[in-house]
Amino acid sequence: MASQLQNRLRSALALVTGAGSGIGRAVSLRLAREGATVAACDLDRAAAQETVRLLGGPGSKEGPPRGNHAAFQADVSEARAARCLLEQVQACFSRPPSVVVSCAGITQDEFLLHMSEDDWDKVIAVNLKGTFLVTQAAAKALVSSGCRGSIINISSIVGKVGNMGQTNYAASKAGVIGLTQTAARELGRHGIRCNSVLPGYIVTPMTQKVPQKVVDKITEIIPMGHLGDPEDVADVVAFLASEDSGYITGTSVEVTGGLFM
């Protein structure tokens, strides 16, 4: 069974955004462990290069021989940057990515009555618009090349149930669910599957900003009794990336330890 898992994605080229830390880095490591070649993208070039170093590839290069992992830098909230990212990946590996995982995301938390328009716009731009732009660019590349693919967008349980002080984040992640479901309907005939993953409270640099007393209260209401690890999310992403989920599209998989079930 272990050898099967190591080879499950052996022919895949996987593009992961937000790959420089947290869930994105864990996803990159997991996909590589199962045999995928990983194009690790982050707004922070050094962080993406460090991920590639952990994968065993030459993180300082953007044009390695085929089969090696590579680091890329892009601001996914900009249409031109998202298009250029897909062009660079294709030029680097001579094919489009067959697995695309949008993990890039930010928070700018504030209560609704005090939230600025700028903080709203920033979160929507990265979390929702960025996911749309990457999904669109990847889908165009796959359709034009006639390749099948699996697009996996990281949403959040907050997009389903809301959360105090996160109107912008919750709205962006709810939008990701709707975007993914609609993309699944449109792209299924091209052999492209689209699914979203809804993490709960996962130990990442983002949640580490939460006060400990708040974390303790959250932990008390999680049926499994603890916060999740990025690897818990990566496990689900690897399944959705593989042919083991070949007849699954348009779904939203919750990874929450039972929170809000």
Image (cartoon, rainbow, N blue to C red):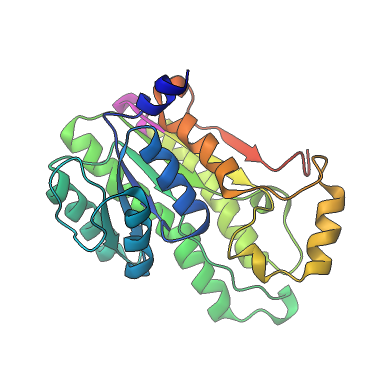
In-front residue for pair 135/213: 213
Task: Magenta stretch: give its range.
Answer: 187-193
The percent coordinates of residue 239 (x first, y second) are 48, 29
Residue 117 in the image: above or below residue 131: below
Q: Residue at x 34, y 29 (%)?
A: 9
- Residue at left 15%, top 50%? 92
Residue 203 locus on image (x, y percent): 64, 56
Q: Quadrant of residue 186?
A: top left
Left or right placement of residue 150 versus residue 165 in this view: left
Q: Is the C terminus in the top left, top right, bottom left or bottom right quadrant?
A: top right
Q: Assess whether residue 168 is covered by the magenta stretch.
A: no
Q: Is residue 248 above or below residue 35?
A: above
Q: Is residue 9 left or right of residue 216?
A: left
Q: Which quadrant holds residue 33?
A: top left
Along the line of sight, which residue is nearer the eye, 12 or 58? 58
Relative to residue 113, is residue 230 depicted above or below?
Answer: above
Residue 218 image offset from top left, x and y in percent: 81, 56
